[in-house]
Image: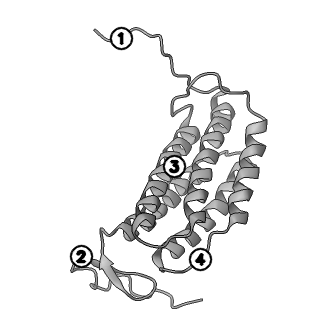
Amino acid sequence: MGNRLSKIYTRTGDDGTTGLGDGSRVPKDSVRVEAYGTVDELNSALGVLLALPKLPPQVSACLFEVQHELFDMGGELCIPGHLAITAEQVVRLERTLDGFNDALAPLKEFILPGGGPASAACHLARTVARRAERRVCTLARSEKVSPEVAKYLNRLSDLLFVIARVLARHERGAEVLWRHARSKPA
């Protein structure tokens, strides 16, 4: 294990730059920092979801593992050339998604984010996952990024959609369906 942080502030970022894992410095709003910062935000959103009471154990276990992998992904994005996310992890997300989805009724309508506190928090995490994927795609246009990172985030957002459906049923028994035909405000 590397050095532990004993002092949290360093003042080295006061000039608008931050250090990458390889020791180089970049602007705090660089595409790379935006990418791993959004992955960190996603990990925090999952932390909020996991802090909610009475989640199904299989959901908690799945998301706890995802949090660790997102931390690894942040390291991969912070250290140019470092690889941490694998094709096997992407396949595992697909299998997990299929397992959760098999128990759900097929979708016939669009659903709205909501359904209960955990389902709503999961939908929010899903949208952050989509943003993280967009940030990684932007980074990949100008710098080398393993394609597994974007694939992982893409599968994760799909998994979070399915888990939000599972949680809506767990919390309320049903999802909130979008009603196309409804009265419009005057």
Q: Secondary structure at mark 3?
A: helix
Crowd band around label 3 with a 10 angstrom C-alpha radius: few (<14), some (14–19), many (20+): many
Compared across the picture, whether 92 is left or right of 81 comes to right
Q: Which residue is mark 2?
A: 16
Residue that label 1 marks = 184
In this rendering, position of residue 100 left or right of residue 123: right
Residue at the outermost left position: 15
> How would you rate the neighbour count of disc 1 (Cα within 10 Å): few for under 14, some for 14-19, many for 20 or more?
few
Give the Cα separation between the discs numbered 3 and 2: 28 Å
Disc 1 from disc 3: Cα separation: 30 Å
Q: Which residue is mark 4?
A: 83
- Amino acid carrying label 3: it is Ala
Relative image position of residue 178 (x, y in whole percent): 51, 22
Question: Comparing marks 4 and 3, which lies closer to the viewer?
Answer: 4
Distance from disc 4 to disc 1, alpha carbons, whole Å, reads 51 Å
Q: Is residue 109 left or right of residue 105?
A: left
